[in-house]
Structure formats: C-alpha cells, structure tokens
C-alpha cells in the first residue's frame, strides 16, 4: 500500500470518528449522565459496552466523550499553528530586530519543560476545554515556529520571490499569496501532528484528574475507571479498553494522514 493510500485510509477513519462525535446525540442510546442500569453491568443488548460504577451507559459516555477530546485537540492545534505562523513565517520574513526578538522569545519557551509546565498550569487554572486548549497551544508552538522560520528563510532568497519583491509587492501579499502556499504541505503536516499531541495530552491530563470533572472525555473515563477500581473488579474490559482503543484509533488515523502528507510534500519539493 502506497503512502497516498495510507493517507486516504487515515482520512476515512478520522472522518468516521468525527462523524460519530458529531452525531453523538443521535447514535448514543442514552443520556451519558443518566443512570440507566445497575452498577458494573456487563455488555448486553441494552448496554452494548456495559455500565460504570453508578449505572451510566459507557457507549453513550464514549460517543459524547469524543467531542471533548477532539475539540481540545482541534482548538489547541489552532492556537499552536496561529502562533507558529506569526512567529516563524511573519517574523522570519520581516527579519531585523523583529526576528531577533521573536527568536529570543522562542528560545525562552523551548527552555521550559513541556510536560511539567502543562501539568502545573492545568492544576492552577479552572478546568475546561478553552483553558486546556490555550495551555496546550501556548506551550506547543516553538518547535513548529523554528521549522517554519527555517523554510521561510529559504523561500525568502528564492529568485521568484525576489522578483515579486522587486515588482513592488507588499509583505502581506507575499506572505499570504506565496509563502503560505509554498508552506502548505508543511503546515498540514504539523497541523495533523499537533492535533495528535493535543488529543494525547488532553487524555493524559484528564487521566491525572486535571480535566473538567463534569465533561465527558476519553481521558476522564479512564480516570474514573481507575479511581473506582475497575481493574480489580474486572470492569476494565468494557470501561477502560473502549476509550483507550478510541484514543489509539484517532492517533493511528492522524499518523496515517501524516505519512501520506510526507510523500506529498516530498513530491512537491522534487517538482520545484
């Protein structure tokens, strides 16, 4: 199977997961917060994935939890990419003191340990989708910015870019119409990569109890399963495995898409 086919398969898998999250209100058999069965019910026709310790339907939790996990991944990725483009592309193109200052800020953020800082910030902020997305986004942009800046500096010296500048084109026009278009494969690759990181980090933080205790998410499902001794009672098979499998499937889909984008980017570079 070629990398393009792998990428398309990843897109299909991701689309199905996104569709299930969007249609959670239709697909979920019960309200995820309603007590619809006895505690620790095994999978049955009434509850396909069983129930948790208070009788909530796990399949319904799984579908609604996808919304939170995917939303945090998408929002944190948006924050990361906006900051990375602003610093890496715009400041790299402008050069001078703007570029030097932005690189000092980038270097400062790179010296901050990612995981400990995210955990500390999450512990001292109100748990929620927006706050978690902002924390993950603000702490994830420096590496992407450095890569984009490196590519921007190479494009900046390209003959056709120099010709466009000589014709009087403004900075905004060149960045929007030419630089970002040339950087599109790289931007798509890092968008997919950062979304995978965002989903994994949301699940990790929720598993540590730093997520919203009210909102359903895949990480919080595993957290409550561990807190309620699902491993000991045997309920882990239908309480822990499904959200863990969903996290793995989303990451697999995103990795497949990244693999496909690598070949597309390579072909684009060879054609120039």
Image (cartoon, rainbow, N blue to C red):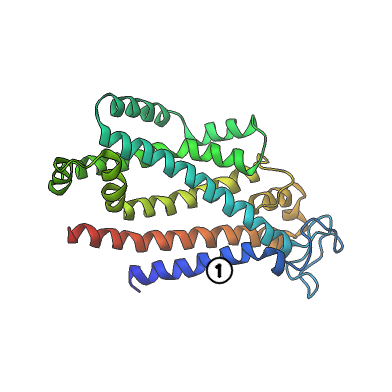
Residue 52: % across, % down: 78, 58
- Residue that label 1 marks: 16
**Is residue 203 at least partly visible in the picture?**
yes
Q: Quadrant of the N terminus?
A: bottom left
Identify the residue at the far right of this view. 38
Horizontal side of residue 111 vs 175, given as left or right? right
Q: Residue at x 55, y 45 (%)?
A: 201
Q: Quadrant of residue 162?
A: top left
Seen from the viewer's position, the closer of residues 158 and 211 is 158
- At 62% from the left edge and 66% from the top edge, which residue is drawn? 20
Q: Quadrant of residue 107?
A: top left
Horizontal side of 36 relative to 260 (left or right) equals right
Determine the residue positioned at 27% across, 33% down.
94
Q: Seen in the image, is 247 located left or right of residue 35? A: left
Q: Is residue 44 left or right of residue 100?
A: right
At label 1, counting other C-alpha atoms closer than 10 Å, the crowd grade (few under 14, some 14-19, many 20 or more) is few
Q: Residue furthest front?
A: 168
Query: From what the image shows, is residue 63 above or below residue 150?
Result: below
The number of callouts visible is 1
The front one of 259 and 225 is 259
Q: Is residue 208 above or below residue 267?
A: above
Name the quadrant of the C terminus: bottom left
Q: Position of residue 208 (x, y in %)?
A: 65, 41
Position in image of residue 249 (x %, y %): 54, 63
Query: Can residue 146 be seen from the camera position used here?
Result: no
The quarter holding residue 248 reads: bottom right
* SS at badge 1: helix
């Amino acid at each position: 199977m070629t990398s393009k086919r792998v990428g398309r398969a990843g897109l299909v898998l991701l689309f199905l997961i996104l569709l299930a999250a969007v249609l959670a209100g239709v697909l979920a058999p019960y309200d995820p917060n309603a007590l619809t069965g006895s505690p620790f019910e095994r999978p049955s026709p009434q509850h396909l994935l069983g129930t948790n310790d208070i009788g909530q339907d796990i399949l319904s939790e799984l579908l609604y939890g996808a919304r939170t996990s995917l939303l945090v991944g998408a929002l944190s990725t948006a924050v990361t990419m906006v900051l990375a483009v602003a610093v890496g592309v715009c400041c790299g193109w402008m050069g001078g003191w703007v570029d030097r200052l932005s690189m000092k800020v980038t270097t400062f953020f790179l010296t901050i340990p990612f995981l400990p800082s995210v955990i500390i910030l999450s512990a001292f902020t109100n748990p929620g989708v927006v706050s978690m997305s902002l924390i993950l986004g603000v702490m994830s942009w420096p590496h992407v910015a450095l890569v984009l800046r490196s590519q921007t500096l190479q494009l900046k010296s390209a003959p056709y870019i120099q010709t466009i500048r000589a014709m009087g084109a403004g900075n905004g026009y060149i960045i929007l119409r030419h630089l970002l278009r040339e950087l599109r494969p790289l931007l798509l690759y890092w968008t997919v990569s950062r979304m995978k990181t965002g989903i994994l980090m949301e699940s990790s933080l929720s598993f540590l109890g730093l997520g919203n205790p009210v909102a359903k998410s895949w990480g919080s499902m595993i957290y409550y399963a561990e807190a309620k001794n699902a491993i000991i009672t045997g309920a882990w098979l239908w309480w822990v495995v499904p959200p863990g499998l969903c996290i793995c499937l989303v990451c697999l889909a995103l990795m497949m898409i990244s693999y496909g984008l690598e070949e597309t980017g390579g072909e684009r570079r060879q054609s120039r």
